[in-house]
Image: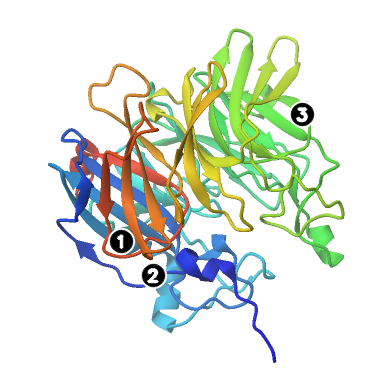
Amino acid sequence: MTTTAVNPYLEGNFAPVHQEITTDNLKVIGEIPPDLSGMFIRNGPNPQWTPIGQYHWFDGDGMLHGVRISNGQATYRNCYVRTQRWQVEHEAGKSIWKGFMEPPQPELPSRNTGNTALIWHAGKLLALWEGGAPYAIQVPDLETIGEYTYNNQLSSAFTAHPKVDPVTGEMMFFGYSFAPPYLHYSVVSATGELVRTVPIDLPMGVMMHDFAITANYTIFMDLPLTFSVERMQRGEPMLMFESDRPSRFGILPRHGDNSQIRWFTAPSCYVFHTLNAYEDKDEVVLFACPMRSTTVLASPDSQTDPEADIPRLHRWRFNLKTGKVHEEMLDDVASEFPRINENFLGQATKYGYTSRLAKSSIPLFEGLIKYDLSNAKSQNYEYGQGRYGSEVVFVPRPGATVEDDGWLITYVYDMSEDSSELVVINAQDINSEPIARVLLPQRVPYGFHGIWVTEEQLNFGRI
């Protein structure tokens, strides 16, 4: 008897949904706060057709799942990000692109899926994938407008995690590459003009998924998840975590160039996501969820690390005067997808929120953690038996005067019911029951990053 290996990222709640639907007047358990008005939108992978070759969770076509909230009522809408790849495969009626675990297909254009994250800036909602250009999305219907290249000024890839300074309105982003220059850094003005792009020197190509900003600096992470064409030519993985290489953190004045960057060395690690960074006298302080090594995106190296792929919240202090680095683990509980109240991005914050990982061979999030960063204390919220969530997004209460006055919102999947819901939690009292549970008309597969689009932004963004 023969058995066929099942890809876990095509089964259960990782499996795609194919219907694009709109449903009004959703059932609500509890009560939606009357001053909560806007739209929660979450991006994630959702293959349009049966994949060919090795499928990884990161390979699927982007699909947006949105819940529009107004006057205590909720509407659900989901829609594919209609990238060039999506259009070509839609017309062909089958998958054409293989995943990133397969050899490159140089005869095909970019396999940009637009499946990773979302950003609102200068009146536009952009769907992001770090290997290519963003796609502009119309709200609230979530239809794809098209690729967005800043009037053809975009000359690099565009990270899935740009940072918008809540004080100046500027947006910072970067793009990494397999070939030199391995990194480009760009600044977009508050009005949406791409005002500068500069190359940053790196010793070799690395996968740089995220970065951080402070009021005056931009922080890059040169971590040892490296690209090597020479390695690939030897029959070894092109992308590999090199545990014998240290981590480097580069701190650059926001409007500076490569000649002004300062590099700090720390023990080897990999970071998918940062929480926040800020300046404290002579120090730049960074919070993120590093793992000691990673096999998530590459074949493991010869050293088997039992701590691989286990992210935990850490804090680094980089002293700009002495050059010293101090690194500290703040919690031994595994968690990822860190978020803050983004009205305080780049400033000293007291609170941070992460998604707590279940003990599983695949990424399942069993609850959320609220951290008090001033004393490294935390509170936990559990979704319940057989219930798993994803990244939580902090939504500030209109008129709030304290940092944690608002709501935490995410999608939660119930295995026993094979159903999904939007959960609204009081950020100041996460141990209590959700304020509202919005029952959704179809299952929402596990995905990546979400955003809250305010009522004002929804009105501004209409075309």
What x and y, as percent, mark residue 61?
46, 65
- Mark 2 lies on residue: 17
Structure colour scheme: rainbow
Mark-to-mark CA distance, 1 and 2: 10 Å
Q: Earlier in the sequence, mark 1 or mark 2?
A: 2
Which is nearer the eye, 25 or 181?
A: 25
Which is nearer the eye, 222 or 431?
A: 431
Q: Nearer the viewer, mark 1 or mark 2?
A: 2
- The amino acid sitting under disc 1 is Asn
- Mark 1 lies on residue: 78
Quarter of the view holding residue 314:
top right
In this rendering, position of residue 355 left or right of residue 454: right
- Kindly check if marks 1 and 3 are in contact, taking CB atoms under 8 A apart as contact: no
Q: Is the residue 404 above or below the residue 132 in the image?
A: above
What x and y, as percent, mark residue 401?
29, 16
In this rendering, position of residue 221 left or right of residue 412: right
In this rendering, position of residue 96 left or right of residue 23: right
Name the secondary structure under disc 3. Answer: strand
- The amino acid sitting under disc 2 is Val
Name the secondary structure under disc 2. Answer: loop
Residue at (40%, 29%) from the top-left corner?
342
| Neighbourhood count class around disc 3 (C-alpha, 10 Å): few under 14, some 14–19, many 20 upward | some
- Mark 3 lies on residue: 266
Q: Earlier in the sequence, mark 3 or mark 2?
A: 2
Which is nearer the eye, 71 or 111?
A: 71
- The amino acid sitting under disc 3 is Ala
| Neighbourhood count class around disc 2 (C-alpha, 10 Å): few under 14, some 14–19, many 20 upward | some
Quadrant position of the N terminus in the picture? bottom right
